[in-house]
Amino acid sequence: MGTRGTHCCAMAKGLPRQTDLAKTAVRFVGQSRIQVGGRNYTPDCSGFVRGVYASQLVDLYGGLGELDGGNGVGRIFTHVVEHGRIHYGPTVHPGDLVFFHNTWDFNRDGLPNDPLTHVGVVEKVDLDGTVVFVSSVSAGIERYRMNLKHPDTHKASDGRVLNDFLRRKHLGDARGTYYLAGGLFAAFGTLAQ
């Protein structure tokens, strides 16, 4: 993981639009279907964040043309690069996007070399720096936790979850494969300001 985000995270006060994005994300928790304004979005992580941002009339694929071999998370990251700000903390806003690398073997080569494979929407940051975010996986839309001060720790000594598992363990995983959110963290993205 390196040092990206190791001094993270504190919650910044969100503008109304940012807070609305976080609230919209939370409303989807427990659901498996993503529908906003009469439009259905794919039930994966990129479809989920597209639906959340569409609730504020932001098209995360806007102006990017055809996909051409990449993935939806990469398209969204490109949109943030062009229209917002990529950052690593130390403050995070509600409604920010949180990106991850290597959550699955996208290129199917058995190595942890798959950039930008997962994305979620930040809900809040706990006092200990644990980022709570909402995302969609095969089981549906859920809350997850990530603590960049302790990226290799699943649970604190008191039982609180610091980092959820975002990658499944497989027998053939390469040495150095990370599984917890803190070890898979790529960046935060801020669009709504």
Image (tube, rainbow, N blue to C red):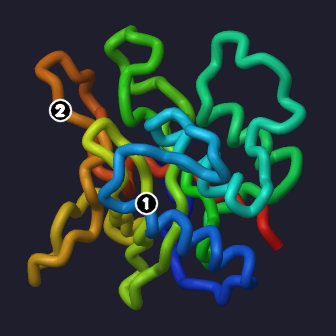
Q: Please provide percent x and percent y for residue 98.
A: 55, 56
What is the crowding at mark 1: few (fewer than 14 residues within 10 Å), some, or many (at least 20)? many
**Residue matched to label 2:** 169
The quarter in which the C terminus is drawn is bottom right
Question: In which image quadrant can residue 43 be found?
Answer: top left
| Most foreground residue, 30 or 107 | 30
Q: Which residue is drawn at 38% across and 75% down?
A: 130
Label at residue 161: none
SS state under label 2? loop
Quarter of the image holding residue 59? top right
Q: Which residue: 21% across, 70% down?
A: 161
Residue corresponding to mark 1? 28
Residue 34: horizontal and vertical position, in percent? 49, 46
Q: Which amino acid does label 2 sit on?
A: Lys
For marks 2 and 1, give the one nearer the viewer: 1
Q: Looking at this view, is 163 or 28 the one in front?
A: 28
The answer to whether 60 appears left or right of 122 in the picture is: right
Question: As displayed, is residue 101 above or below residue 31?
Answer: above
Which residue shows up at 48% across the image and 42% down it?
A: 45
What's the CA distance linking mark 2 and mark 1? 27 Å
Q: Residue at the location (78% across, 17% down)?
A: 66
Q: With 4 as the anchor, is 136 left or right in this view? A: left
Circle 1 SS class: loop
